[in-house]
Image (spheres, rainbow, N blue to C red):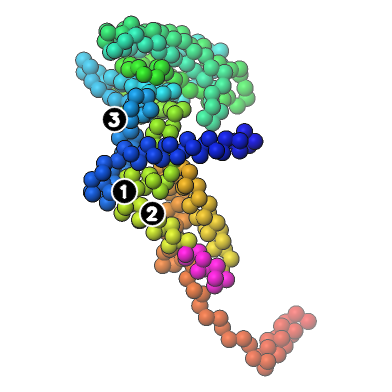
Amino acid sequence: MASRLERLAPDYAERARNWTQGLTLRDDSPATILLGMGTGTYPRTAFTQAPGRTGPSNLALGVKDNAPVLRLTTRGPFYLGQKISAAPGETLRVSLRLRAPEGAVPVSFGICEKWLLYSEACATAGHRAVGGGAWESVSLSLPVPGAPRPVPRPLEFWVHAPPGTVVDLAGVTLTGPGAEDRLRNGTFRAGMDHWLITDDSHGSWRIFNQYFTSFFEGGLLGLGAFVALLVLASLRCAEALWWGNRLAACPAGALAAFAVSCLFDAQLEAPAVALLFYVVAVAVVGPQAAGRRPQEQAEPLSPAMTRKVSNIIYREFR
């Protein structure tokens, strides 16, 4: 936490540069200002318009000799991976067809134990593609890292090419002693099913501000709709608190924290966070929301009725 607090000023400067660069990628047409560039278009726009290596990396599926081919265009620390099942100490063999259409490229393969987003105890192997667009058949041995444990750690197989390179992959397999393929969809015939991507330069994929992201993707109408829902939900929570509904403090605090965090990250690009926000906001502003003014309180009991009730209670429990 101390190191993070020390980086507040440079972190803000980095985010401000990210905001400026992201907004400059927009078209200046009136239609774009009103309707935006389209939902989910920022990575594609940044890839085609950002200069040099500042844009995101890219994956593209093609066909060669009636077989799918995956092209990796890397502009940063980019990894293509898949979770696998294997026992520590096993030796697996990765086999594939590989080509570098431009120049010679060193391609790395590895297996790592994963702790959330972070890698531990990696085993790696490498091959230098000759370049020139010629296909090569590659086969390398990869030992499975780690030690036997009562609860095995997750393992991930990955492929990596350095920034500024282009590599084509086809027919990837990862076999063990029994010749069983540990990869799923290694031929890419099912698209990118089962494959994961990791890019440590995640700022090239996104704008670190939900309000700017909504404006980039949806224009003034998209930004207005998002802000209107957030403000309306907050007002309904305030109304409920005004009428004494203390439970409304829960969604009120959640919405306030969400609104502030949206200043420094694109929160709605995470499906789980987006779903939670929309469920809370719609529940608060809905016709059955707890923020409505409660019904009028019943009249208090008269003294005669109070004595009558007291007598009944006394007779029942004496």
Amino acid type shown at disc 2: Phe
Q: Nearer the viewer, residue 278 or 89?
A: 278
Q: Does the stretch in magenta take in 241? A: yes
Q: Position of residue 182 (x, y in %)?
A: 43, 19
Amino acid type shown at disc 3: Thr
Report if residue 44 is visible in the image.
no
Q: Nearer the viewer, residue 41 or 316?
A: 41
In three-dimensional space, the C-alpha distance between marks 1 and 3, rounded to whole angstroms, equals 20 Å
Q: Give me the residue at 54% from left, 71% from top.
A: 242
Q: Which residue is mark 3?
A: 48
In three-dimensional space, the C-alpha distance between marks 1 and 2, rounded to whole angstroms, equals 10 Å
Q: Residues within 10 Å of mark 2 (few under 14, many from 20)?
A: some
> Left of 122 or right of it: where is 194?
left
Q: Residues within 10 Å of mark 1 (few under 14, many from 20)?
A: many
Quarter holding residue 186? top left
Secondary structure of residue under mark 2: helix
Range of magenta residues: 235-244
Q: Which residue is mark 1?
A: 218
Q: Are marks 1 and 2 in contact (CB under 8 Å)?
A: yes
Q: Position of residue 220 (x, y in %)?
A: 31, 52
Secondary structure of residue under mark 3: helix
Picture disc at residue 226: 2
Quarter holding residue 76? top left
